[in-house]
């Protein structure tokens, strides 16, 4: 992807200049329309979901253009509008888009208008995208730290087809914070496709669901976040909520198993918020640890290639794993804690190693708070240049996947590549083994079974680990004031 896209985009912009069409940001934009986002809806080739806010209840519409020509009548557009926390929230769910097409759109709300753009997946086996971790900001300057990192990511990969955020957009998920987030990220979110993941800081009062128009109609339902999946080229991605009392329930695991067995895409990935493998402070809680066997078992069984997550604000990559043991790359799942994109960052807790998981499985880790670096067994390679926000780029070209991760130095804005991974595998080997309807709302028995499984894990595995590390945790608390 795709020099041709840019040629097409150039033609589109020429049309805009010649005919004054609804393309790009223009003087017609109006502050009365805010919080605009464009997210994947259904699949990457044919659907997008749009959200925008207005301060008053007003008639709204969205028009979709190709080369300046209004094609909205050929599409299926469903609208939704409701009052939300003092504003009016509008959503438009658009289906029937054509694959491999550059689109522009114009949202109108009364006399106000807002223009944006996106392109659809062309279905080939070349896919490029950006993945970022926690921004978790409260004030505008802190949001801008994260936004500048995403800008840098697009400098490195201007041809990215979408960008994913792995949760914790905000700190307290308030009206004010989401407003600041939208002010900072609005330009990006209007002019690309976003793939949102819910973080534990995002779900207060349902704010996350109110910011993004996602397709959850065929997903398992959870309380504090969204589960959905989609195809983009030869990649199948499942987004999993990990923010309920049980980080991942039996109903979610069943949904994920069915979802991953319903695709013959060459590459299978999971995006979620909490991380099963980390050297940070949050791995000590049973919710994250439980993912090491509950989620990991489904990834083992269904041949998931890559799991990307956030929550603990550092970068960690495991070696390829199956049953928590290192295996050959093509036989295992690689787990990546994608690093904090914003300014809140954590230090290593070295006593985690060999207590919460074997040091053997760890390949690379960066503590963003102090620049500590771990690779291939060396935990003492301290380098201040690792202090900064992190982003990841992923390129899939047929049977090759290349991941590159970068830190953006806070002071100098210089880029430093912190990790690089290539996975090669044969194509066309995944088979569809589930053809049922992929809906699993869960029921009382599922819920009870989920609690029983978690309780069994906590008492037999987590409590002994926790007690073993308790002296170190107390020392850490005395030294840092953080448990
Ligand atoms: Fe989090």
Image (cartoon, grey):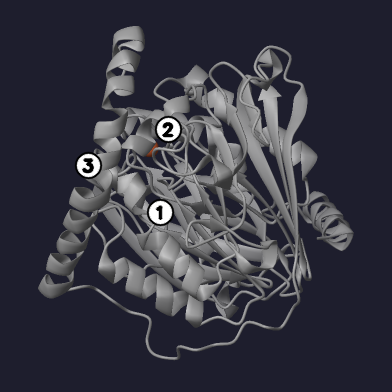
Which of the 4 image quarters holds residue 126?
A: bottom right
- Residue denoted by label 2: 352
Q: Residue furthest top?
A: 479
Number of marks in the rendered image: 3
Which of the 4 image quarters holds residue 73?
A: bottom right
Numbered mark located on residue 56 in the image? none
Instruction: Tell me if label 1 and label 3 are in contact, CB under 8 Å.
Output: no
Cα distance, mark 2 to mark 1? 14 Å
Image quarter for ligand 1: top left
Q: Nearer the viewer, mark 1 or mark 3?
A: 3
In the rendered view, tell whether residue 112 sits above or below residue 331: above
Q: Say whether residue 238 is left or right of residue 419.
A: left
In the rendered view, tell whether residue 326 sits above or below residue 406: below
Which of the 4 image quarters holds residue 227?
A: bottom left
User: Mark 3 falls on what kind of element?
Assistant: helix
**Residue nearer the viewer, 414 or 321:** 321
* Residue 354 placement (x, y as % from top left): 45, 38
Lower position in the chain sequence, tag 2 or tag 1: 1
Q: Quadrant of the N terminus?
A: bottom right
Numbered mark located on residue 292 in the image? 1
**Residue nearer the viewer, 121 or 64:** 121
* Residue 259 placement (x, y as % from top left): 45, 76
Q: Nearer the viewer, mark 2 or mark 1?
A: 2
Cα distance, mark 3 to mark 2? 14 Å
In the rendered view, tell whether residue 369 sits above or below residue 302: above
Q: Quadrant of the C terminus?
A: top left
**Residue nearer the viewer, 27 or 189:** 189
- Residue denoted by label 3: 463
User: Mark 2 falls on what kind of element?
Assistant: helix
Residue at horizontal 86 percent and vertical 53 percent from the top:
10
């Amino acid at each position: 992807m795709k020099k041709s896209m840019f040629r097409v985009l150039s033609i589109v912009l020429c049309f805009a200049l010649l005919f004054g069409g609804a393309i790009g940001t223009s003087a017609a934009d109006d502050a009365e329309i805010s919080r605009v986002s464009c997210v994947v809806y259904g699949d990457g080739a044919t659907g997008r979901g749009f959200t925008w806010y207005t301060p008053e209840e007003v008639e709204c519409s969205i028009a979709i253009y190709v080369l300046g020509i209004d094609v909205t009548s050929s599409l299926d557009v469903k609208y939704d509008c409701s009052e939300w926390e003092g504003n009016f929230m509008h959503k438009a769910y658009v289906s029937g888009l054509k694959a491999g097409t550059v689109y522009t759109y114009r949202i109108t709300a009364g006399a106000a208008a807002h223009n944006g753009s996106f392109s659809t997946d062309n279905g080939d086996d070349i896919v490029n995208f950006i993945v970022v971790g926690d921004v978790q900001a409260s004030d505008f300057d802190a949001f801008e730290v994260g936004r500048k990192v995403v800008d840098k990511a697009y400098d490195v990969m201007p041809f990215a087809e979408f960008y994913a955020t792995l949760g914790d957009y905000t700190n307290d998920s308030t009206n004010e914070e989401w407003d600041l987030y939208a002010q900072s990220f609005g330009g990006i979110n209007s002019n690309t496709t976003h793939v949102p993941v819910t973080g534990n800081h995002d779900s207060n009062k349902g704010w996350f669901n109110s910011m993004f128009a996602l397709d959850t109609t065929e997903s398992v339902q959870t309380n504090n976040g969204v589960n959905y999946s989609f195809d983009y080229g030869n990649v199948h991605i499942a987004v999993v909520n990990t923010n309920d009392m049980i980080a991942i329930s039996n109903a979610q695991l069943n949904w994920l198993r069915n979802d991953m067995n319903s695709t013959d895409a060459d590459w299978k990935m999971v995006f979620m918020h909490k991380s099963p493998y980390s050297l940070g402070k949050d791995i000590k809680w049973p919710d994250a640890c439980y993912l090491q066997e509950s989620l990991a078992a489904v990834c083992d069984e269904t041949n998931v290639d890559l799991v990307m997550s956030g929550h603990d604000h550092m970068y960690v990559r495991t070696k390829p794993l199956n049953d928590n043991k290192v295996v050959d790359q093509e036989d295992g799942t690689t787990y990546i804690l994608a690093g904090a994109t914003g300014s809140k960052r954590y230090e290593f807790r070295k006593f985690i190693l060999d207590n919460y998981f074997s040091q053997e499985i760890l390949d690379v880790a960066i503590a963003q708070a102090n620049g500590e670096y771990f690779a291939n067994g060396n935990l003492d390679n301290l380098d201040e240049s690792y202090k900064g926000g992190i982003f990841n780029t992923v390129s899939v070209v047929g049977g090759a996947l290349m991941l590159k991760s970068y830190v953006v130095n806070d002071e100098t804005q210089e880029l430093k590549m912190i990790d690089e991974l290539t996975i090669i595998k044969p194509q066309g080997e995944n088979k569809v083994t589930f053809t049922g309807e992929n809906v699993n709302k869960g029921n009382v028995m599922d819920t009870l079974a989920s609690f029983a499984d978690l309780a069994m894990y906590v008492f037999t595995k987590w409590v002994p680990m926790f007690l073993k590390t308790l002296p170190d945790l107390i020392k850490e608390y005395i030294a840092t004031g953080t448990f």
